[in-house]
Amino acid sequence: MVKNKAIYAVLIGSVMLMSACKKDGFRRRGQWNQTPETTTPVTTEPITTTPAPASSYAVPSDATVLDLGTGSGYLVIDGNTLNIASNTFIRIKAGSYKGITIKNILASTAKPVYIKNVGQVNISEFMSTENITNVIIDGDYTAGLTYGFQFANISYRAITMSGKMSGVVLKSMSFTNVADYTISGNNNNGSGFAYRGTAETRTDGFKILNCSFTNAGSIIFGGSLNKDNGEDSGFFKDVEIANNLFQNSAYVGSVCSFSNVQDYNIHHNVVNNVNTSATNHNGVFMMQGNGLFHENKLTNYQGNAIRMWLYSRGTSPAVSQIYNNICYNTKKYSGFELQGFERYIISGKTTYSNAKVYNNTVGKMNTNKDWEGQLLDLYNTGGTLEYYNNLGYELNTNNSGITNMINNMSDVKITESNNKYSSLYQNAVANLSAFTSLLAGIGSSLQ
């Protein structure tokens, strides 16, 4: 039997006074925690519970259900005020909200707190989270709605996250016309939050799944690992970025960037028409640490598909992998980048990462022809590289010609086999839509 609980929605006015400079079409701030805020007096209104519409999600039979929101204004979901415990299922009433604040919810891994949409929930100013763990914010509740939480025409940042956020999932959301960062962390889970070797001082299991980003800013979580100044901050472990669409963002730079991360998994994302007006050296995905990048499709863009700046936690090197990706038509740079830095290597704490690059299909790189446009830009990483079953076509080089499709600026030991290159796409892929390989066993299996 589902337990229903009479509740009240707490509405607050929250006005973010913002001053930031424009850069590459998006505003940026040097310190993420300096955005001043003011609040109006708290107002409370009773909620009239109405039956939820047809849902694609079954509420656990033993969950506590809270129906919140009036369909407008500012909604505050405070775990302290509402006594929200593990195994709570929160449903937000459909409507157009200015802002939603979610805070002080500490659930267990086995019994997370779900926050779902009941119908279409539109947000015009912001969503903020503060000190939440094992909370799944998911817009998949109402049958027929792909993105139950929609952010549109946001003048600053869409989602800002403070404090604890382990086990947090952002899912089935759309973001359109976001002027600054789309999803970002403040300094207490970023550059100002020191890792001390415990789970409490890192963020575990953060996920962004099944979301759409159109003319939107970066997903960005700062931090640093630097032997030179002793910093180890903003550390994330087991990040997953999957099944998202990034499109039509002319100046975004990196659609996703984590500055200190272990065991990330970036997969099954589609990127199209991003950085079409950008000129800086960027990675569409920019990840510092170790992890996997696979089954992603990127077309009509600028920058490396991913810049992997490599290191591993502990004393045994991890294996970072790039595989089964499709990359087509960039203005600048090669398909992928691998690089490591001495500042990442701290005796007894971190070491280098080995790498594998395989089963990728990459074509028409660096049409500007002002830099190498090959399959891989390879710098010194401190580790080894296994490189095989890659398919390239219409690549560019300033050297004597395309050989193994690596722009090699390193002394990395490379083990390579079965890589194929053609100057004409007709000899490599069946067409420039599906990118199906004409060579059995070579290139991406993403179809």
Image: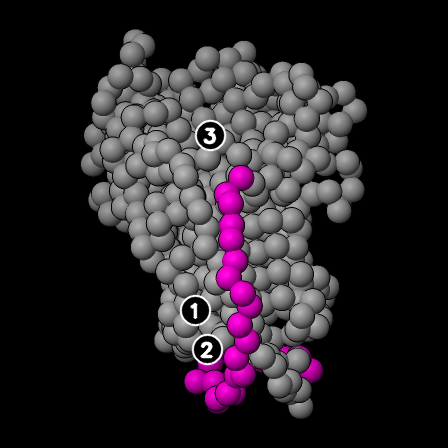
Q: Decide: marks 1, 3 in contact (CB < 8 A)? A: no
Q: Secondary structure at mark 3?
A: strand
Q: Secondary structure at mark 1?
A: strand
Say the numbered circle drawn on residue 70.
2
Q: Decide: marks 2, 1 in contact (CB < 8 A)? A: yes
Q: Which residue is mark 1?
A: 73
Q: Which amino acid, mark 3?
A: Arg
* Circle count: 3
| Residue 39 colored in magenta in the image | yes
Q: Earlier in the sequence, mark 1 or mark 3?
A: 1
Q: Secondary structure at mark 2?
A: loop
Q: Which amino acid, mark 1?
A: Gly
Q: Which amino acid, mark 2?
A: Thr
Which image quarter holds the N terminus? bottom right
Q: Is residue 68 left or right of residue 399?
A: right
Measured as percent of width and height from the top left, residue 252 is found at: 35, 38
Is 286 located above or below residue 339 in the figure?
Answer: below
Query: Does the image show residue 74?
Result: yes
Residue range corresponding to the magenta coloring: 34-63
Residue depicted at x 61% and y 21%:
383
Q: Which residue is mark 3?
A: 307
Is 89 located above or below residue 137 in the figure?
Answer: below
Q: Is residue 152 left or right of residue 201?
A: left
Query: Does the image show residue 363?
Result: no
Furthest-top residue in this view: 400
